[in-house]
Image: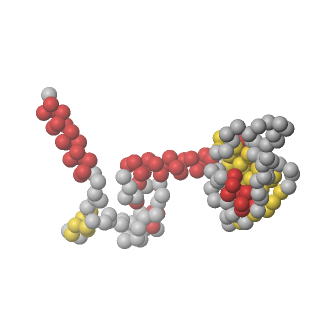
Amino acid sequence: MTRTVLAALGCLFVLALGGCGEPETVRNGNTSSTPARNASPANNGVPGQASIDPNTSANTAENPVAATRNRKRDEMRQTAGDPPANYDIEEMLKRSTRPAPENSTFAVAMANVVVERRIFLNHPILAKVEKVTDGARSTLKVETTDGRTLDLRPNAVEALSVASSAAIMQAAGLQMPRSKPMDRKPGAANRN
């Protein structure tokens, strides 16, 4: 039984290897590694001119997997139609929101523009950072908890989804407020 299975696998291997090369065609008694170019309606009956008929599979030297993938891709393109002209960016951002470092959330929406938004949930200074990319042009805005909006260079903060709040604040020219010294009760002794 093992020999039968091995023999069957060997035959399949030989058949698979045999189907991987380009077919040889005979032209005037000589063998050639390129397919013959016959006269067809697609090339207006001119012999020696390549056929350009997209519906024939003889014109492609693809393996069956690639041919299937390309056929499915073309079917999807035909059935997809045009994308809607009115995008709801806020809805896209809402659906793509995920947790990010330093108790923040990150969301991205891709439509006719790419919008990246990071919201800090309890940062003392940063409220929101948003980068909008429209083709080759980008804008980067930082909103603070006191309502200020600062415009930055588009590449001032790398990887907005994981950038530290310190890096964002440094790029915006912001500083953390100094912590107040702890008030001590009068008469409390310093025990060291």
Q: Nearer the viewer, residue 18 or 137?
A: 137
Judge left or right: residue 167 versus residue 177. left
Expressed as whole percent of the image width and height from the top left, the position of residue 89 reads 75, 48
Please state the horizontal and vertical placement of residue 31, each as a whole percent of the image. 22, 67
In the figure, residue 94 lies in which quadrant? top right
Foreground pick, 177 / 69: 177
Q: Quadrant of residue 2?
A: top left
**What color scheme is it?**
secondary structure
Q: Residue furthest top?
A: 1
Relative side of 51 to 98, left or right: left
Quadrant including the C terminus: top right
**Residue at image location 75% in from the left, 61% down from the top:** 172
Give the camera-side residue of 177 and 46. Answer: 177
Q: Residue at x 32, y 64 (%)?
A: 35
Check the image and report above or below for 149 versus 47.
above
The x and y percentages for residue 118 are 71, 48
Residue lying at the far right of the rendered structure: 147
Horizontal side of 2 relative to 19 (left or right) equals left
Give the mark count. Answer: 0
Quadrant in the rendering for residue 184: top right
Residue at coordinates 79% horizontally, 62% vertically from top-left?
151
Which residue sits at x=69%, y=52%? 165
Question: Is residue 73 depicted above or below 45 in this figure?
Answer: above
Is residue 86 visible from the viewing direction of this image? Answer: no
The spot of residue 130 in percent (x, y) is 74, 54
Residue 33 can be seen in this image: yes
Q: Quadrant of the N terminus?
A: top left
Viewer-closest of 56 and 120: 120
